């Protein structure tokens, strides 16, 4: 997995900050989020689906958390073992199920 540059990381955080200020159900938020997801795809971010439990992952679209992934980690985050990552909520599903993207920072 490719690690993003400092400039790309700063741009990502700035764009996520813009999303948080938009109304929940707005077409502009949907458009900005779609553009951001397309950009993160180009950067090599990985998509996965998980449950928002309030501890490890965030539950609202556009929220993110930074994590240190331990060596020996398996599952979706196994490719990032021993690295620092950013996990971003890109979509909400039914109940507590959420769509996420993760990338090394």
Image (cartoon, rainbow, N blue to C red):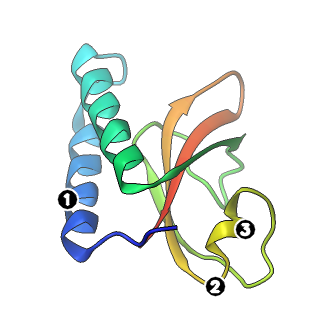
If you read the primary sequence from the N terminus, does the residue marked by circle 1 or circle 2 appear first? 1
The structure residue drawn at horizontal position 33% and vertical position 29%, both measured from the top left corner, is 34
Q: Which mark is residue 27?
A: none
Q: Which of marks 1 and 3 is nearer the N terminus?
A: 1
Vertical side of 25 occupied by 11: above or below = below
**How far separated are the C-alphas under marks 1 and 2?**
24 Å
102 left or right, relative to 14: right
Cβ atoms under marks 1 and 2 closer than 8 Å: no
* CA gap, disc 1 and disc 3: 26 Å
Image coordinates for residue 25, horizontal then vertical, percent: 36, 16
Secondary structure beneath dot 3 equals helix
Residue 11's label in the rendered image is 1
In this rendering, the label closer to the viewer, 1 or 3: 3
Measured as percent of width and height from the top left, residue 33 is found at 33, 33
Report the disc number at residue 82: 2
Mark 1 secondary-structure assignment:
helix
Q: Quadrant of the C terminus?
A: bottom left
- The Cα–Cα distance between marks 3 and 2, rounded to whole angstroms, is 9 Å
Q: Which circle marks residue 78 in the picture?
A: 3
How many neighbours does mark 1 have within 10 angstroms: few (below 14), some (14-19), or many (20 or more)?
Answer: few
């Amino acid at each position: 997995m490719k690690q993003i540059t400092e400039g790309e990381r700063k741009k990502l955080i700035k764009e996520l900050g813009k999303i948080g200020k938009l109304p929940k159900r707005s077409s502009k938020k949907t458009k900005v989020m779609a553009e951001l997801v397309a950009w993160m795809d180009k950067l090599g971010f990985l998509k996965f689906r998980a449950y928002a439990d309030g501890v490890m992952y965030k539950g609202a679209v556009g929220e993110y958390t930074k994590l240190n992934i331990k060596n020996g980690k398996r599952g979706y985050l196994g490719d990032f073992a021993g690295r620092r990552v950013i996990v971003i909520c890109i979509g909400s599903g039914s109940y507590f199920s959420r769509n996420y993207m993760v990338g090394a920072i």
